[in-house]
Amino acid sequence: MATSHTSALYQSIHRQPEIIRDVLHREAEHAREAAEILAGARRVYLTGTGTSSHAAVVTEYLYRSLGLDAEARTVFDFANYGPPPRREDAVVVISHRGAKTYGNRVLEVAKSAGSRIIGVTGFDSPMSVPEVIFHTAPQEKSSTHTMSYTGNLTALWMTGLAYAERAGKGPHPLRPVLEKMPETVAEIVQRDYVLQPVAQALARSGRVVFAGAGPNVQTAREGALKVKESSYLTAEGFEIENLLHGGLQPQQPGDVAVVLVPPSAAAERATDLVRALELLGASILLVHDESRPFAVPTVDDGTPSVSTFLLPPVPELLSPMITVLPLQMLACRTAEIRGTNPDSFRSDDPLFKRINESYKL
């Protein structure tokens, strides 16, 4: 059975600085070409499924902040429920494999509409329809995708910043942050040992909720997906506010809760959530910016285990690139403790092998 140190998942997590650096250097011209497409678009649709749909929504936040009319949709929803794109729209299709049913259907829909198309995919992908195609990472050997996510975010964000810089007024303020990301990520992934106690608690309880705000709602959902794919446990990602509106009620003492503390006004609501989780008796992991101390609230009947994973300060719009890292590492370490194979999509289980073969992705 694969472990966190021998699994393809572990190797992919630790390759992310290399992948991000490569995309920054190799895909700069494609980013400028794609930026021209964005500049001429009435609306920009960002589409994907699973991890790719999380990348789409995170990128929507950045693009909208840059003045683009951007909308993130899953490929299934976009292909089946419309409305169809117009000729003056741009459609971005994010698909690491480049061969999935509904990603290809979106390409057909966009091509039929005469929309301009940008593709974000992996090496050796069969994707060919888009006018501009980014190839961001090798095809992952693990079904629990990690390096393709951060590689794809890099390409999407490079394009957004190139769009913002078209006026020739110099680098966007976020450009140095993105350029430094390989070093930032390299430092973080070396600290996966910090998560061992939380992984042990999760392996015992079998249940975890993740909570975030703004673009990091998608990080919370991505963290839950990584736990499900690698450790086969019950996991769910929430917006902080929605977790307080009914999401807490199924939780039990001893369950694990991971709170991505936002560097914004939403931090106050995170305090309310952490207090509620303490009263519940949850095992809590706080992930937050080291430059913004977070005062853990106290409760009358004592406090449960509260762990902290500190991150270097990064503007909130680009923070999903780093907030996802401890969640990936937590999933990997939990799989090691449980003895599950994080790379197989559970196909080494005869039942799930049959289930996986019963439908086409």
Image (cartoon, rainbow, N blue to C red):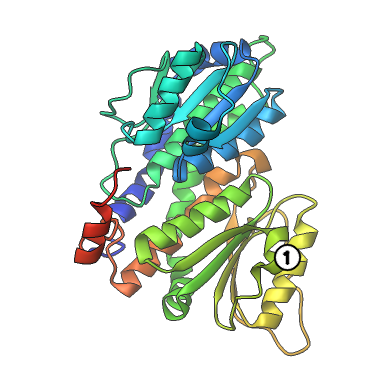
Q: What is the three-letter code of the residue carrying label 1?
A: His
Quadrant location of the N terminus?
A: bottom left
Quadrant location of the C terminus?
A: top left
Query: Would residue 38 be visible to someone looking at this image?
Result: yes
Query: Would residue 96 be visible to someone looking at this image?
Result: no
Q: Residue at x 40, y 34 (%)?
A: 102
Which residue is identified by label 1? 245
Picture quadrant of residue 196:
bottom left
Picture quadrant of residue 292:
bottom right
Q: Residue at x 68, y 79 (%)?
A: 278
Answer left or right for 197 relative to 339. right
Answer left or right for 352 relative to 34. left
Query: x%, y% of residue 279?
Result: 71, 82
Picture quadrant of residue 276:
bottom right
Count of labels in the image: 1
Q: Residue at x 80, y 60 (%)?
A: 268
Q: Residue at x 41, y 17 (%)?
A: 130
Q: Residues within 10 Å of mark 1 (few under 14, many from 20)?
A: few
Answer left or right for 153 relative to 65. left
Q: Is 340 placed above or below 146 here?
A: below
Answer left or right for 319 relative to 269. left
Query: x%, y% of residue 222?
Result: 50, 52
